[in-house]
Image (cartoon, grey):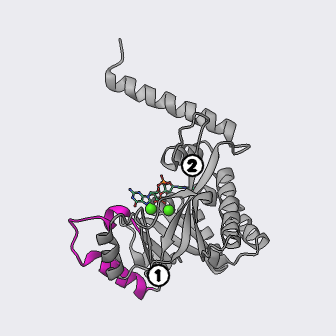
Amino acid sequence: MAPTLAEQAFRDKIIAKRQIANYLRKSVPTMAGFSIVYQPQADPAGRIVGAEALLRWDPGCGHVVGPVQIVPLLEDYGMIAGVGRWVVERALCQLVEFRVRGIRLKRMSINVSAPELARRGFASHLMSTVDALGLQPSAVGLELTEGQVLSDADAVVKAVRTLHAAGYSWEIDDFGMGYASIRWLRKQQFTGVKLDRSLVNATDEPPGLIPGIVYLAHALEMTVVAEGVETVERREAMLQAGCDLLQGYLIGRPVPAGEWA
Ligand code: C2E
Ligand code: CA
Ligand code: CA
């Protein structure tokens, strides 16, 4: 019997996924085609004080693939730890290079996956990289989504605690999408939250919601980053709410390091 259109679409999707995974397998040993773009983060006075490192991959056809497509495959096929190490080294070298160029960033934010933390050696590799580059732990911000925290809670909590004790900051990414409470996150030694862009741009939420989250976070000595800020109106609202850092297309798009002035 011929497959239905839905079945065919599903099969095509699986085949495409396998093809990308095969390409990835060939690319990862040399990191061919991988790159990082950097998105600026501004303080309330509008100064660019930080950057977030965001992974990109060009499989060779000139079409750049974003992390939403490749990170789940790298996780599923056991390749994320190697790629994560490369991201840590690359992004922190870039922070040093920015500073040499006179771009005075306080911090580089790096996205981390739970399977990276589940593998032994993440913390020691990060610490030795920071040390070798002459950086301070405060120059690194680590970001994990709530889903990642819950997917392998023991390994994650252990890594969070080890690195928190060594002076590293941890932010919960996409905050507002899941169910974690700020108090619980503080208990796990997260030092900040990043408000998801759907929350930052929501028009159907009570106006007191974001100021309330910021108030609570600050009361627990946690920082708040607003991401996905695209308009002057949202920037003003986030500043009024007391957010510590702003990120989004209005502040700057993610671009290769060479395009940073
Ligand atoms: P994220 O950490 O929430 O990153 C923000 C995403 O929103 C980025 O997409 C960025 O390009 C996009 N963005 C930033 N500002 C705006 C805005 O004002 N409006 C809109 N509409 N979008 C904006 P990207 O680069 O595709 O990254 C997607 C996700 O992939 C990231 O979400 C992060 O969770 C993950 N990721 C990125 N790099 C890495 C990495 O090196 N390792 C791991 N494990 N995950 C990564
Ligand atoms: Ca992030
Ligand atoms: Ca986010």
Q: Nearer the viewer, residue 249 or 143?
A: 249
Q: Secondary structure at mark 1?
A: loop
Pick out the residue farthest to the front.
Answer: 261
Tell me the number on the disc at residue 56: 2
Tell me the number on the disc at residue 222: 1
Q: Residue at x 47, y 68 (%)?
A: 172
Q: Which residues are magenta?
A: 195-220
Q: Look at the image and tell me whether residue 87 can be seen.
A: yes
Pick out the residue farthest to the right.
Answer: 132
Q: Position of residue 236 (x, y in %)?
A: 32, 76
Q: On the image, which quarter does residue 104 sit in?
A: bottom right
Q: On the image, which quarter does residue 87 sit in?
A: bottom right
Would you say the beta carbon of the disc 2 residue lies within 8 angstroms of ligand 1? yes
Pick out the residue farthest to the top.
Answer: 1
Q: Badge 2: how crowded within 10 Å, few (<14), some, or many (20+)?
A: some
Tell me the number on the disc at residue 259: none
Question: Eyeballing the image, is 115 above or below 94?
Answer: above
Q: Position of residue 28 (x, y in %)?
A: 68, 43
Q: Residue at x 37, y 80 (%)?
A: 214
* Amino acid type, residue under disc 1 in the picture: Met
Q: Is residue 208 left or right of residue 241?
A: left
Quadrant location, the C terminus: bottom right
Q: On the image, which quarter does residue 92 sit in?
A: bottom right
Q: Secondary structure at mark 2?
A: strand
Quadrant location, the N terminus: top left
Q: Position of residue 16 (x, y in %)?
A: 50, 30
Q: Residue at x 35, y 84 (%)?
A: 215
